[in-house]
Image (spheres, helix red, strand yellow):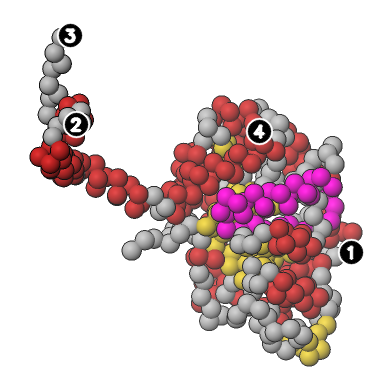
């Protein structure tokens, strides 16, 4: 029996430097999703941010609606919707509408909100973001299952609330909770029996937290009568590959410094490891794959081992380190050479080639015998005048007769 097929996708925050045209940047994000669709990627997750000028998409739902009209198969998720920023009924209703518009292709990723500056502008106390996420998720899960909900909170209220359209997906749209190093996301995923989005899984802290976060989720799930599905567990990490390591490293010099500046000087997330050579530091720490398809295969295999039993999908963190052409080529190399390794796409091809190779001598003898018999039949019926000795020798394996000197 074939093992579970690992899925591949992208986590598109997105990251765009402030020296480029933002309108074109968003269009390129849409083009990336279309390119992924052509290459056979399974899913794309779209972020929500409202400040700091780098992660441009404010409404993942609006982006998903546009992307859905340009694609047919790839699944599209909010990556993630920041629950404290929205009234739960309004957000659930928008996701439910997308569920119908995409015929079940939409996924709902949730989190407390990554940028403190977003919460600050809305007057949301940072210390309450995670509590508000937990509270909102509890009612949204019920709404997206078609239930009626009454709930009174200090920041929202629901009075016999329900979605006016029965959900398209049954029993619900797929839901996943974002998790980094803290146990917040893992606990929420376990409590509600939903998926887990492990952001920063390739960072040192994230990598070390993989098995423990999954253990926290499964323990919480058992406490609340739920189960966790490893197939709904997604790991996120940055990758850029080319034919050689040297080419990959040259590619990322296009935009890596601006990305590093954003995380070190602007965002409140300590993502980039210290070091004189940032490329070397990220590769040596395992944060990023900047190399060849084989390097990507080795790193993902390491993540599978560290996870303690595997996961359902690996998502490339869309980073725009390279120019557009090199970025598209990296995604193509992943699809051409990395997907097959984890999806067993070439197992039967390998077995078929080996079987034919192992039996080549016997098969060749059969062919020679069959063709030789027809040659002999022709000679008997029509004579050998039109039969080239060289062809006879090639088919039968016999030595061709020497040509007489003229």
Q: Is residue 24 magenta?
A: yes
Residue with the most extreme top position: 406
Q: Is residue 4 magenta?
A: no
Q: Of 183 and 65, which appears nearest the observer?
A: 65
Q: CA distance from mark 1 to mark 3?
A: 103 Å
Residue located beneath label 2 in the image? 387
Residue located beneath label 3 in the image? 406
Q: Check the picture and name the quadrant holding the N terminus.
A: bottom left
Q: Which range is magenta?
A: 23-52
Q: Is residue 120 left or right of residue 361?
A: right
CB-based contact (under 8 Å), mark 2 and mark 4: no
Q: Tag 3's secondary structure?
A: loop
Name the N-terminal-most of marks 2 and 1. 1
Q: CA distance from mark 4 to mark 3?
A: 68 Å
Question: Residue visible at 70% across and 84% down?
Answer: 166
Q: CA distance from mark 3 to mark 2?
A: 20 Å
Residue located beneath label 4 in the image? 252
Name the N-terminal-most of marks 1 and 3. 1
Q: Is residue 31 above or below residue 368?
A: below
């Amino acid at each position: 029996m074939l093992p579970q097929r690992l899925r591949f996708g992208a986590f598109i925050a997105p990251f765009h430097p402030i020296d480029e045209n933002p309108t074109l940047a968003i269009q390129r994000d849409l083009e990336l999703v279309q390119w992924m669709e052509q290459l056979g990627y399974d899913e794309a997750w779209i972020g929500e941010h409202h400040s700091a000028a780098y992660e441009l998409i404010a409404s993942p739902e609006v982006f998903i609606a546009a992307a859905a009209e340009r694609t047919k198969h790839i699944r599209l998720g909010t990556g993630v919707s920041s629950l404290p920023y929205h009234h739960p009924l309004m957000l659930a209703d928008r996701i439910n509408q997308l569920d119908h518009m995409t015929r079940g292709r939409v996924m709902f990723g949730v989190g407390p909100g990554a940028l403190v500056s977003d919460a600050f502008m809305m007057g949301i106390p940072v210390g309450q973001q995670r509590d508000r996420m937990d509270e909102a998720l509890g009612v949204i899960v019920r709404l997206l299952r078609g239930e009626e909900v009454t709930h009174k909170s200090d920041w929202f209220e629901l009075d016999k609330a329900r979605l006016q359209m029965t959900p398209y997906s049954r029993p619900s749209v797929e839901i996943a909770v974002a998790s980094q190093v803290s146990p917040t996301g893992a606990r929420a995923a376990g409590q509600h029996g939903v998926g887990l989005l492990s952001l920063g899984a390739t960072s040192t802290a994230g990598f070390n937290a993989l098995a423990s976060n999954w253990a926290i989720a499964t323990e919480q799930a058992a406490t609340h009568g739920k189960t966790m599905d490893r197939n709904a567990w997604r790991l996120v990490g940055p990758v850029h590959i080319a034919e050689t390591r040297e080419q990959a490293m040259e590619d990322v010099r296009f935009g890596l410094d601006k990305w590093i500046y954003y995380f070190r000087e602007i965002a409140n997330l300590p993502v980039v490891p210290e070091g004189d050579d940032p490329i070397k530091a990220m590769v040596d720490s395992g944060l990023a794959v900047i190399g060849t398809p084989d390097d990507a295969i080795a790193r993902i295999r390491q993540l599978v081992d560290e996870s303690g039993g595997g996961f359902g999908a690996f998502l490339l963190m869309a980073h725009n380190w390279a120019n557009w052409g090199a970025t598209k080529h990296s995604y193509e190399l992943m699809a051409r050479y990395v997907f097959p390794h984890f999806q067993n796409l070439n197992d039967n091809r390998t077995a078929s080639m080996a079987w034919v190779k192992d039996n080549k001598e016997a098969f060749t003898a059969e062919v020679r015998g069959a063709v030789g018999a027809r040659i002999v039949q022709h000679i008997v019926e029509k004579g050998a005048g039109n039969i080239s000795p060289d062809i006879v020798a090639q088919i039968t394996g016999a030595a061709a007769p020497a040509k007489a000197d003229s």
